[in-house]
Image: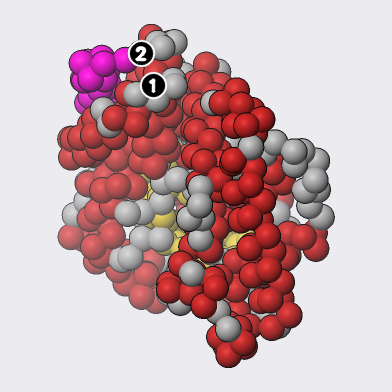
Amino acid sequence: ILFDRLSTTFSDLFRQMGGKAKISEKNVQDAVEQIKLALLEADVNLRVVRRFVNATLKEATGEHVLRSVSPGQQFVKIVHDRIVHLLGDEAAGLNLKGPDTTSVILLLGLQGSGKTTTASKLAARLKKEGRRPLLVAADLVRPAAVDQLVTLGSQIAVDVHSEKGAKDPVKVAKNGLKRGKKELYDTVIIDTSGRMHVDADLMKEIKSVFQAVKPDETLMVADAMTGQHAVDIAKSFDETVELSGVILSKFDSDTRGGAALSLKSITGKAIKFIGVGEKSDDLEPFVPERIASRILGMGDVVSLVEKAQETIDEQEAVDLQKKMASKNFTLEDYLDQFSRMRKMGGLEKIMDMMPGMQGQMEMDENQQKMIAHQEAIILSMTPKERQNHFMIGPGRRKRIAKGSGTSVHQVNKLIKDFDKMRQMMKKAAKNKKYQQQMMKQL
Ligand code: GDP
């Protein structure tokens, strides 16, 4: 089963750690040691494992984690986020031109990696998305490759350019592209030949084809079961032609995860799709978050991570309240809060947490725009001005308005509102009832 060992280790660990109200440095070290062994066993590249272990140890043994409200959950979140990072963070799509120009996708990889199958899967997918693909059979080494592509193409009703008895893959690729342009196909997908191993002959051929067709996407197809060997192959190809990404085939088979977890951080190349079967619709976008959930054993993990996220936000909100109530709350601090506020669901949500302000900040689109303007205005101030808003006279206001693309009126309003807010906070902070409420929230 997919990632079997790896996810068993993770879910066991997370159940142990996630439930703990207190964890020690030793707990973290033991847990990280178990993760290390599991990753090595999953055939993850040694350098990747080392970096992962060191970074996780450092972060998870930090005071702010061990002393936090829910250290076990924080630990889970740290590991989860790092796994997502190893997988590439965001899903990477294809970079193709618009439908009125012909884009070129070049597929390469070793023999048996799944290139021909993947070419047809990709064509089926693009066709579904409304594009008009043409497949080009330029694998002239593997005896059955051309016929295979022709058959697959007819199954999904996509045209295939093939040349009987052709010997020169560069010519076939060029002719295919020429035909694609002439007959207004918007995407030309070129299947190339592989070899049993990376060799000079293969690289020379790939390079010539690459130079002849100048692809928009140069994707290496790698068999997920080959583990970190896939990383070495990707490196070789990338030295010859610049890869724009990788497709991991046979992700439905017994893959341990080594290839998926090592590729991005070693080669810098994103995994764009995974092959999950032999049929033409067995191709899925590679979504790091989703794969991480599978690796980490799903269910429990997701809820634990969500919980950890909540506690972190609560902590931030409390810090923010404190800061707001303190005497020296400056525009600089205010600016700092913008990104946090966004993360916590906006000023609205924070205001709701402030005593006496519940429900007073319903934000509509205009107000959100206003917030964006406010941010721009403060960003146009000098650090000194942000530290001391009293020094911002008429001349400076004019300059700030210009710099932020707003009006002097808007700058005036921001400073006035900020000052009012500051005074209100100060007053509130002196108020006994407010303090009691704040303590209750703490
Ligand atoms: P090529 O030599 O690189 O063109 O490889 P092929 O496209 O002929 O694929 C080799 C074998 O792997 C074929 O039997 C395919 O059906 C199989 N294959 C390719 N992709 C997948 C996949 O994602 N999952 C599974 N289970 N098999 C695959």
- Of the numbered discs 2 and 1, the one sitting upstream in the chain is 2
Q: Position of residue 284 (x, y in %)?
A: 56, 40
Residue that mark 1 sits on: 71
Q: Residue at x 68, y 68 (%)?
A: 416
Whole-number angstrom distance, CA of label 2 to CA of label 1: 6 Å
Q: On the rendered structure, is 381 left or right of 346?
A: left
Q: Quadrant of residue 62?
A: top left
Q: Position of residue 170 (x, y in %)?
A: 38, 71
Residue 319, percent from left and from top:
49, 39
| Foreground pick, 338 / 275 | 338
Q: Nearer the viewer, residue 383 or 59?
A: 383
Kindly identify which numbered label has been placed on residue 22.
2
The relative height of residue 412 versus residue 42 in the rendered view (above or below) is below
Could you tell me which quadrant the C terminus lies in?
A: top right
Element at label 1: helix
- Specify the quadrant of the image occupied by residue 256: top left
Q: Categorize mark 2 by other alpha carbons within 10 Å: few (<14), some (14-19), many (20+).
A: some
Residues 30 and 193: in front is 30
Tell me the kind of residue under disc 1: Pro
Label ID, residue 308: none
Q: Residue at x 64, y 62 (%)?
A: 418
Q: Is residue 89 magenta?
A: no
Mark 2 in CB contact with mark 1 (< 8 angstroms): yes
Name the image colouring.
Answer: secondary structure
**Magenta-colored span:** 23-44
Q: Is residue 148 visible?
A: no
Which amino acid, mark 2?
A: Lys
Residue labelled 2 has its Cβ within 8 Å of some atom of ligand 1: no
| Magenta span dominant secondary structure | helix
Task: Tell me if residue 32 is in the magenta stretch.
Answer: yes
